[in-house]
Image: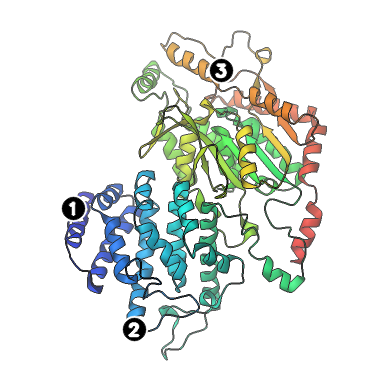
Amino acid sequence: MPGNDCRRVRRELSRLRDTPEWHIETVRQFLTVLSDTAQLVVGGDRSLLAAFVSSCGFALLDRCFSALIGHAGDGIPPNLTHERRPLGGTQSRIHERLLAPALSHAHTILNWCQSDTLHQVGRSALLQQFCRIFAAAADANCVESSALCLGTIAACDREFALLIVATSGIVQRLDRILQETPSKEFLVKPTAAHRNASGTDAPTPKLKLLGAHRVTAACRRLVAALGLERRYGDHGRAARERIFGRLPNLFRRPRPHGIRILTLDGGGARALVSIEILKELERRTGQPIHQLFDLVAGTSAGGILAVALCIARKSLAECELLYREFCGKVFSTPTSRAVRWLGMGRLLFSRGYYDSAALERFFRAFAGEMNLIDSRAVAHIADDPPCVFCVSTIVSENPAAPFLHTNYAPPPESKPRYRYAAHHRVYEALRATSAAPTYFDAFRCGSETFCDGAILVNNPTAIACHEAKLLWPDLPIDVLVSVGTGRCDPRLVSEPNQRVATAGSSGDSIFELARTLLSSATDTEAVHHAILDLTHGRDMYFRLNPDVAPLSMDESRIEKLEELVQVTRKYIEQNTKQFSHIAEKLSAGAARKEHLRAAL
């Protein structure tokens, strides 16, 4: 029972907290509690996580590490040695075997913590413990788990990322792992499970190589959270140069010919317009969207599409099915007066006309429990996704401001203009960016409250340009493609009596009025005109946004959605030259790049 588990954890942690001196047996008892907590939290028991935090569980974790690796200020911990000197002695091996599971369970628990708890951990001595372990540990499992813990904390707040970068030994350790070939400690060092009966090391090359890839992936995730990607843009270059000579560095992102940016407007069900336009770009270039662009940004429905294409790696056909299912399940049309009044009740008491719980379940089923920063945990840079962010509005602060849910961090030396975080789960970012007022209630994540990013920034092109200059200050923007969800033109209304906002007899007039005001506030053309003026005479900015009939963001009628698709296809046919030119610029140098990729 969850209640019994919480009481048991509190009781055990209270007993361990009162223990004056910790020995190995005390550490083992704490690890048992830590393991049980991690397993139950992963199983869905969030109350147990709250019990662990409120019972000083992280303070006890700090004591556990101190007992295993020595107290801070002693220089190199006695049971952690430089990675080129393997651990020796029975006691060191015991500590090493206990340290690895402690770090693994700690990462599991941290991965489920919200911003408030991560801020507490980041401001405690536990952060320095993780840094010391990562900088000096010899065991691959300890390096991997400590890198994952540091990446989760750094992704929460820029303050912690800067502290980690400034800690002695962190950058040097990353240099050795990412800029050189994998060292023998990761490729050769066996675990206890890989020793044969005679005590000698059994040959397990595949498992050893997998371990090296896991360490590399964890370190690349940490690099993304610290904003050091420019430093490690191509961690395999040194090995290739020894084999092939100094060939051009064609695998470093962004590509040598400049930065390629894609921005996607919000618009609810009208996101089908964006999907049709992106289909045409993929058809003309022969490449998926996540390989065409270096930075992809979206707001509301555009943010959902950006995450689906570049982080979840869904195809555009899957995204179209997703949006149609989304409109059918979440924007279901009320069939009776009682159901409509139920929606009005939600609007009055929870500030959302539609069922926000159904929206969250939909996103959970689609994205699972992956964090945004987890998308950067790749062993090879060729698998690295583009930088992605979706915009929400943080309304728990005064004044409300744009908030970026990213899978990256700006470089330490940069000065970001907008608040960001990369530790949120994918479904949390989607829920935040799509929490349109009057449609859904605000999304609360710990002490933070988010609403739809379209309230302030429905067209994220200007923010995307700012982020690109932070990430790649020495490279120009080569291609900037801004995709809209349709510019409403009342002249295209097929039915003379049709109006988007109609105060019907059902009593929905307040909702319709609020919806009309929201549609007016989320206009995207003002940003487009500003960018157009700034890029006048430069062949690099392209706005793709057809004129469509006025259509509400919660449209779910199949015939209206099909009409939207047909209008977009007609727009593509009428602008064939523009699409061909964009595809040509996006495909520039692709043949030479693929030829050398095959050679390497």
Circle 1: element type? helix
What whole-number distance in Å separates the C-alpha atoms at marks 2 and 1?
A: 36 Å
Side (left or right) of 243 relative to 275: right
Residue at image coords 67%, 41%: 261
Side (left or right) of 345 relative to 194: left
Which label was assigned to residue 520?
A: 3
Side (left or right) of 580 relative to 501: right
- Which picture quadrant has residue 536? top right
Q: Nearer the viewer, residue 391 or 579?
A: 391
What whole-number distance in Å separates the C-alpha atoms at marks 2 and 3?
A: 71 Å
User: Picture coordinates of residue 587 (x, y %)?
Assistant: 78, 47
Q: Residue furthest bottom?
A: 198
Q: Counting residues from the N terminus, which is met first, the one under dot 2 or under dot 1?
A: 1
Tag 2–tag 3 contact (CB < 8 Å)? no
Circle 1 residue:
7
Colouring method of the image: rainbow
Amino acid type shown at disc 2: Thr
Amino acid type shown at disc 3: Ser
Which is closer to the viewer, label 2 or label 1? 2
